[in-house]
Amino acid sequence: MGKSFKNTRLGFVARGKAVAGLSLMALSLPLSVVSLTAFTPAGAHAQIFDDEDDKEIPGQQPTDNTVWDAKKLQKLDRNVRKLERAVSRVENKKGAPPILIEPDPEVVALQATVDNMSRKQDEQTGTITTLIGQIEELQHQNQQLIQQLTNQNARMDTLVKRADLADAHIKDIDAQLAPPPPPPASTGNAEGDFEQAFNLMSSGQTDDAGRAFEAFTTAWPQATQLPEAWFRLGQIRAMKSDPSGAVAAYATSLKGWPKTSWAPEATVKLAQSLSDSNRPTDACSALTQFDKVYAKSATSETRSQAKTLKDKNRCGAV
């Protein structure tokens, strides 16, 4: 009997070791399995370990004369079978009731914080994306405005130039249409008026001098200075590129071929104005008269100018 009890006890020990190995396997399972006894409520524990696991095996008899030891071993055997069935149900997941695990409050709070931060980050990412789009749109609009401003500035410059040209043209027209300014006021006598006109010419005021000499020829038709006034008026018209007007003035001053100091110069200048007016024959006639009347009394410079005009107009020798 003692030997039988010993064998039975060794069998339970062997099964206990096997159960211990299964317990190690259970510890290697995920957190939901490892926390089976620690986090599962009593109700869930009842679902895993039902009442059938507490029933005694029919016909099983104590293996020893001591009833206490047999019951203790039988209870241990039932507990081992409970653990085996629980592990088998969790591994196979065939009809196993759900395992209720109480979550860790700190983990739940941390997960909520992470979720909140993740949501805020997503919102900020969306906001940044929207702002970037708005900035790109504003940059595009700014470039368009700059181009429009550049075009308007170019157009403004063109309009300003056109306005300046138009203003200058209007001033030219006004100057052409405006009546000439009046001649200088008369001094009251022929000698004074002639002297006034000659001084204006000597100082370079040719416009005022021309008007003064024209006024003199009208106001003093009998003055001894009249021929020279026409001669000076011819000089002024020649300087202003008016050869026809110069011819008329020079010809008027040389009526009667006066024996004055300025007469030789006036004759050569008459020939020059006739040449400039494309009248070579008349120019040669004036030069012929110069040779007859004034060549001997003329200066060497005046005679040189006469010879040049003869060659230019192909005048024959006298």
Image (tube, rainbow, N blue to C red):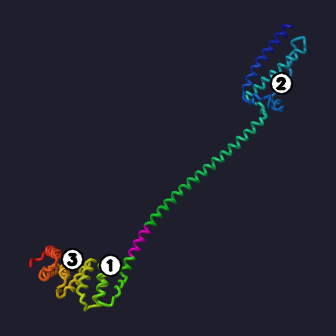
Amino acid type for the residue under numbered disc 3: Asp
Give x and y (percent) for residue 242: 26, 79
307 and 25: which is toward the camera: 307
Q: Nearer the viewer, residue 280 or 49?
A: 280
Neighbour tally class for label 3: few under 14, some 14-19, many 20 plus, Cα within 10 Å: some
Alpha carbon of mark 1 to alpha carbon of mark 3: how far? 24 Å
Q: In terms of image quadrants, where is residue 49?
A: top right
Specify few, some or many for label 1: CA neighbours under 10 Å numbering under 14, 14-19, or 20 or more.
few
Front of the two marks 3 and 2: 3
- The disc, 1 or 3, on the residue closer to the chain's N-terminal end is 1
Task: Report the residue at 21% width, 77% height from top.
Answer: 276
Q: Do the residues labelled 1 and 3 touch (CB within 8 Å)?
A: no
The secondary structure type at the circle numbered 3 is helix
Instruction: Give the residue number, with chain letter if any, for mark 2.
Output: 53
Q: Where is residue 138 in the image (x, y as percent from the top left)?
A: 56, 56
The answer to whether the residue labelled 1 contacts the one labelled 2, judged by CB atoms less than 8 Å apart, is no
On the image, the x and y values in percent for residue 206 come to 30, 79
- In the rendered image, the quadrant that contains the N terminus is top right
Residue 274 seen: no
- Characterize the magenta stretch by its predominant secondary structure: helix
Q: What residue type is labelled 2?
A: Asp
* Badge number at residue 205: 1
Q: Residue 276 carries which label?
A: 3
The mark closer to the camera, 1 or 2, is 1
Q: Residue type at mark 1: give it.
A: Gln
**Label 2, residues with CA under 10 Å away: few <14, some 14-19, many ≥20:** some
User: In this picture, which residue range is highlighted in magenta?
Assistant: 158-169
User: Of helix, strand and loop, which one carries label 2?
Assistant: helix
Q: Is residue 212 visible?
A: yes
